[in-house]
Image: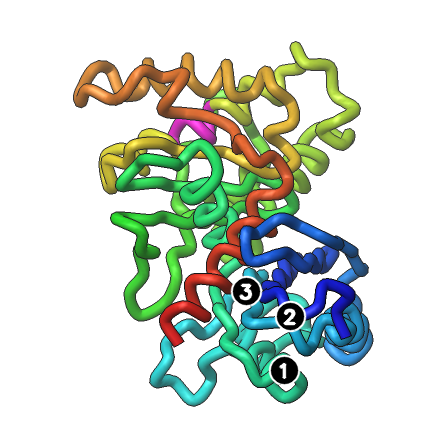
Amino acid sequence: MSERGDEAMFGSIEAGGTKFVCAIATEELEIMERVSFPTTTPKETMTKVLEFFKPYEESLKGIGIGSFGPIDIQRESPLYGYITSTPKLAWQNFDFVGTVKEVFAIPVAWTTDVNAAAYGEYVFGNGQGCSSVVYYTIGTGIGGGAMQNGRFIEGFSHPEMGHMLVNRHEKDNYEGNCPFHKCCLEGMASGPAIEKRSGKKGQDLNEEDEQWELEAYYLAQCAYNTTLMLSPDVIIFGGGVMKQRQVLKKTKEVFKELLNDYVEVPELDRYLVVPKLEDNAGTYGCLALAKEQQLHS
């Protein structure tokens, strides 16, 4: 039983390929407790997740899940709530939402991990007051989430913007890290791509290293493509790679060159930004989605 009596509480499950981050928050979405577990097998990881929420069962009114993917988001699909064709073999065709609902008979919001981060920034961060927000996470993988007027942009499935094709930099002879596309954004600009190309992890590279010139070139193409396809109010670049603050500065410079004044965009220091919520965007997004889901259930 929750120590906070009858107060409504909401839960967040940020399911990443490396770790799960779970949190419990008040009705005002003030985080009361947060834990993380390594992502191992569904049985082992989900046992820890469900045990975390069990003491709050009487007060828990909704849970928001932002998961690594691909996932099935089509409500009419028999596989809605499943992780589908993920490279993490143990998690293929795993009924995530069903597993949670077996224990907690409450509304569950279900989306991708990067959509959750986009929603967190939309509600609480650098997307506040914007009608159109795009969020990219640049880390072990690259994913993108987009919002328009408070709704995620999606169709038969969720976007896979991390796999947009990019032009190879003239100085770059690396073939690409993506097993499907080689020279896509994830294949050329993710953390593992930086490490395999340079032989060092990004955090071990000097900020003047040539790798960051290549990184900025690929991220600038991402911003260029996003600008011309979606005309968003803001593009937010999160994830571990973006902790190298010189990357954003270089990306803006290359983006300006690529765009070549073709369209007028907001002032670049407000248009291409890092998350205001830093590493907490996904957690806050899941909590906000949980509350939203409960209100409309």
Q: Is residue 218 magenta?
A: yes
Query: Which quarter shows the N terminus?
Result: bottom right
Residue 17 appears in the rendering: no
Q: Amino acid at mark 3?
A: Gly
Foreground: disc 2 or disc 3: 2
Q: Residue 253, relative to residue 158: is it above or below?
A: above
Q: Which residues are magenta?
A: 217-221
Foreground: disc 2 or disc 1: 2
**Mark 1 falls on what kind of element?**
loop
- Mark 2: give few (<14), some (14-19) or many (20+) Cα within 10 Å: few
- Callout 1–callout 3 Cβ contact below 8 Å: no
Pick whichever, 213 or 253, lies toward us: 253
Judge from the rendering whether residue 234 lies leftward or rightward of residue 93; answer left or right: left
**Mark 2 falls on what kind of element?**
loop
Q: Is residue 53 magenta?
A: no
- Callout 2–callout 1 Cβ contact below 8 Å: no
Instruction: Give me the residue at 74% from left, 56% from top.
Output: 19
The residue where tag 1 is placed is 104
Which of the two discs, 1 and 3, labels the residue nearer the N terminus? 3
Q: Tell me, for residue 6, which label it has, or none.
A: 2
Q: Position of residue 99 (x, y in %)?
A: 63, 83
Q: Amino acid at mark 2?
A: Asp
Residue 224 appears in the rendering: yes
Q: Position of residue 233 (x, y in %)?
A: 29, 32
The residue where tag 3 is placed is 64
Q: Tell me, for residue 224, which label it has, or none.
A: none
The alpha-carbon separation of the residues under discs 1 and 3 comes to 12 Å
The alpha-carbon separation of the residues under discs 2 and 3 comes to 20 Å
